Image (cartoon, rainbow, N blue to C red):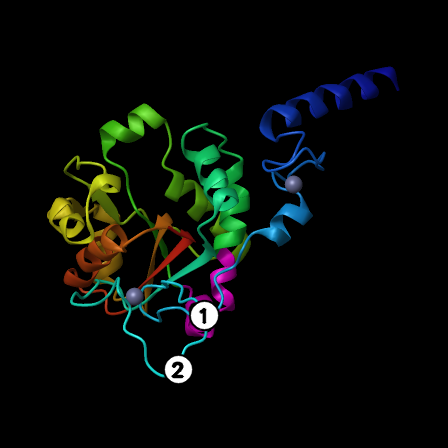
Amino acid sequence: MVISRAFWNAAERALDLLYPACCGLCEEPLRAGRALCDRCDAGLPRLDEPFCDHCGQPFFGLLDGMVECPNCEGRSLGFDFARPVLRRCDESMALIHQLKYQRRVYMARELGRLAAEAFCDERLAWALHERWPLVPVPLHRARQYHREFNQAAEIARAMRDLTGLPVCHALKRVRATRTQTALHRGERFANLKGAFELTRAGRRLAAAKPPGVIVLDDVLTTGSTLGTCALALKRAGCRKVTAVAVVRG
Ligand SMILES: [Zn+2]
Ligand SMILES: [Zn+2]
């Protein structure tokens, strides 16, 4: 009996290391396996209509008739459409930063669960039925070495556990690029030219002619990164490529 209690105490301490005791956004204590409390989860602003049906840019206010999206105007993005789940706000960006820069890798489970809400969009209904593979946006080897993990791959893994969709590391980043944050919309595509190539798994995937593929990233800002990844897959023969992101930056 004593041994058993000691065992459970040790197990509980191990879980504390893996999961936080408190919610990532408030001080609410959590049950094991969560990194976000239900109240903060419900308070995260979901991307609701109206939004651009190509890149997911939210439109504000009452709309009358067709609206041209300022982000998509005059350029074609590589994916068929992108479906971000959350709007950008302090809280949604805090979760992304905790995963990416504070290395709270357990946050990927919450972000993967949130990203899976994209399947509520009827345009993605077939993706679940036909088991479209999730392709995380890759990091360059040097950046991944520094960060020790790829946030998009961790989010993809969490989505796989929830949805049963396979993860395929179909792309590699062959060129280290300047960070996109300081660049304008037009410069971003140019900065990414030739940055992605197919891996061996990616070539096998394209040769198998899947009914569709989902490229996945943590944040979609202008869509240049996800668009360039989608283009690489399309050039290799993937017919339908859509994009999913946790946050519309
Ligand atoms: Zn909370
Ligand atoms: Zn748009």
User: Magenta segment range?
Assistant: 116-131
Occupied quadrant, residue 8: top right
Q: What count of labels does the image hold?
A: 2
Q: Residue at x 83, y 20 (%)?
A: 5
Crowd around label 2: few <14 · some 14–19 · many ≥20 (10 Å): few
Percent from the top left, x then y, of residue 197? 16, 47
Crowd around label 1: few <14 · some 14–19 · many ≥20 (10 Å): few
> What residue type is disc 2 on?
Asp
- Disc 2 and disc 1: Cα gap in Å? 10 Å
Depth check, front residue: 97 or 164: 97
7 left or right, relative to 123:
right
> What residue type is disc 1 on?
Gly
* Residue sticking out furthest to the bottom: 65
* Residue sticking out furthest to the right: 1
**47 w.r.t. 37: above or below:** below
Percent from the top left, x then y, of residue 110? 55, 45
Q: Residue at x 70, y 24 (%)?
A: 11
207 left or right, relative to 133:
left
Dot 2: element: loop
Residue 122 colored in magenta in the image: yes
Q: Is mark 2 within 8 Å of ligand 2?
A: no
Question: Which image quarter has ligand 1?
Answer: top right
Q: Residue at x 26, y 65 (%)?
A: 70
**Residue placed under numbered mark 2 in the picture:** 64
Residue 61: mark in rendering? 1
Percent from the top left, x then y, of residue 42? 63, 53
